[in-house]
Amino acid sequence: VINGHPSMAGGRDDARLTTRMEGKNGEDWILSLYSIIHEAGHGIYEQNLPAAYKDQPVGRSYGLAIHESQSMIMERQVCKTPEFFSLLSEKAET
């Protein structure tokens, strides 16, 4: 996505993510990374809904508030930790 909002589309069997490069020439890559991890949180939520009940209300998303809360867990509680940045710096060195 060039100038659009990052998003997750699809569902349990086919989750597709888009992001955008932040900053003039993508130099603010950490914001892009947070964005894609946030969208991945949406995909993880969808892909972990109970497949055995996919055609029943209990097998569907509980709404946008729960959806957003699950993606914010990934963005804020997983990715903004010292452990995450330690792993990220290890990967960047290789």
Image (tube, rainbow, N blue to C red):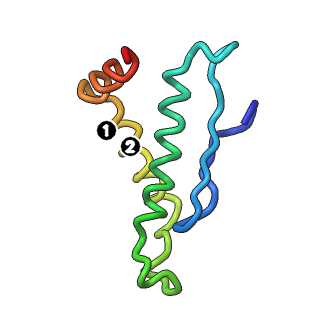
Amino acid type, residue under disc 2 in the picture: Met
Per the image, the residue denoted by label 2 is 74
Instruction: Tell me, for residue 77, which label it has, or none.
Output: 1
**Left or right: 57 as drawn, with respect to 87:** right
Instruction: Tell me, for residue 28, which label it has, or none.
Output: none
Residue 38, x across and y down, in percent? 48, 42
- Mark 1 lies on a secondary structure that is helix
- Along the line of sight, the residue nearer the viewer: 8 or 69: 8
Q: Is residue 17 above or below residue 88?
A: below
- In contact (CB < 8 Å): disc 1 and disc 2: yes
Q: Is residue 25 above or below residue 49?
A: above
In the rendered image, the residue lying farthest to the left is: 83
Q: Residues within 10 Å of mark 1 (few under 14, many from 20)?
A: few
Q: Residue at x 41, y 83 (%)?
A: 52
Amino acid type, residue under disc 1 in the picture: Gln
Residue 7, x across and y down, in percent? 62, 46
**Left or right: 4 as drawn, with respect to 60:** right
**Left or right: 39 as drawn, with respect to 1:** left
The quadrant holding residue 18 is top right
Q: Residue at x 47, y 39 (%)?
A: 37
